[in-house]
Amino acid sequence: MNLEDFGYNEKLEKLRIENNLKDFEIGRVVSEHKERYIVKTEKGECEAGITGNLRFSAKNREDFPAVGDWVALINYDSDFSIIHKILPRFSIISRQAVGQFAEIQIIATNIDYALLIQAADRDFNINRLERYLTICYSSNVSPIIVLTKTDLINEKIINEIIDSIHQRIKDIPVYAVSNETQDGYEALKMVIEKGKTFCMLGSSGAGKSTLLNNLSGRDRMRTDSISKSTGKGRHVTSHRELIVLENGGILVDNPGMREVGIADKENGLETTFRSIVNLTYNCKFKDCTHTFEIGCSVIEAVEKGEIDKSSYENYLKMEREKSHFESSVAERRKRDKDFGKMVKNFKKDMNKNNHTL
């Protein structure tokens, strides 16, 4: 395979030249295992680590390589290389890191489209879809909604689910597929473009691994049934992996996500809830919280049935979550800055004492 098979294009070549990387080998990170990376290059697949300088200069997790990254490599031998630099990313899908204060977890980079996958029989949750949409919009990624396991429910319920999506979520394509009968797959395959990178987002048991197997035409990923005791999906995919499909599309399989914390930096929330946000400009008070104020245009629209109440409540919840995360990031930065000052003053005092002695 050549680099174009993994999505390399003229824009990336221009970035390579602008960053003085013509003398380095270029590859794409296809999987990650605890700071050990599998990278695809024109010569084949190799394992790679990162330079000490890259590690030292990293301010946070976003500065480390991730699945989907294009990287410049120093080759030590045919089986192992060192990542010298990450080429600038054109998109980053990320969320709040689970259990880590004010940290962001990168899901994948350089993604063109995200397949938002939910099982129509038991996993369907439109509030979660709005969360995924917010992640997509803040990441500069185009969303596509995919409903799986349609063979487990009747056509009337499928149509009701699709109608409920269209009522709350505008102008986003929705595809309904059956992993058993293959219904709907031909239409879905038509949107998988050669050279474009797609990332699958969904919870455990939503049917992502089976979807990947069917799209690729072969069993790439092991699949499991739903747990009878909990009614939830088991984690089958344990790590992210980038795979080239038979039709030339590129797909990132992603472990199931039960928690989708919003770390919105690029107005993704405003885009997802555009109809609500547009109303906020007509509120009586500039600092309106849209929760109890008289003269709030949003509350009036909800009371009149112009805005879906569940969508409104989801918006408020995600807005609070976003504000909390932003304040946590600011608090962490201040703490790190204060610690840096303390270390600097300590070194200064130590040098002064040494000179005195």
Image (spheres, helix red, strand yellow):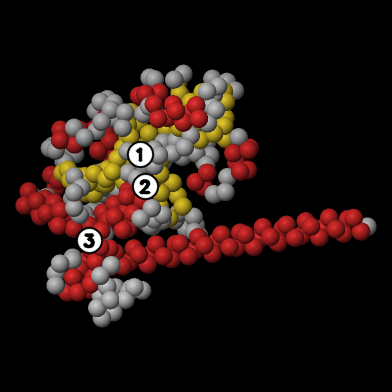
- Neighbour class for label 2 at 10 Å: few (<14), some, many (≥20)? many
* Structural distance between the alpha carbons of marks 3 and 2: 20 Å
**Amino acid type of the residue that numbered disc 3 sits on in the rendered structure:** Ser
Q: Who is closer to the viewer here, 331 or 99?
A: 331
Q: Who is closer to the viewer here, 174 or 91?
A: 91
Q: Which residue is mark 1?
A: 111
Residue 25 seen in the current view: yes
Horizontal relation, residue 84 to residue 319: left or right: right
Looking at marks 3 and 2 on the same chain, the residue that comes earlier in the sequence is marked by 2
Q: Quadrant of the C terminus?
A: bottom right
Q: Who is closer to the viewer here, 217 or 326?
A: 326
* Structural distance between the alpha carbons of marks 2 and 1: 9 Å
Q: Which residue is mark 3?
A: 275
Measuring 87% from the left and 59% from the top, which residue is drawn there? Answer: 353
- Neighbour class for label 3 at 10 Å: few (<14), some, many (≥20)? some
Looking at marks 3 and 1 on the same chain, the residue that comes earlier in the sequence is marked by 1
Residue 12 horizontal/vertical position (percent): 42, 30
**Amino acid type of the residue that numbered disc 1 sits on in the rendered structure:** Ile
Q: Does 3 appear above or below 66?
A: above
Horizontal relation, residue 260 to residue 191: left or right: right
CB under 8 Å between discs 2 and 1: yes
* Residue that extends furthest to the right in the rendered view of this protein: 357
Give the secondary structure at mark 1. loop
* Structural distance between the alpha carbons of marks 3 and 1: 27 Å
CB under 8 Å between discs 3 and 1: no
**Amino acid type of the residue that numbered disc 2 sits on in the rendered structure:** Ser
Q: Which residue is mark 2?
A: 139
Looking at marks 2 and 1 on the same chain, the residue that comes earlier in the sequence is marked by 1
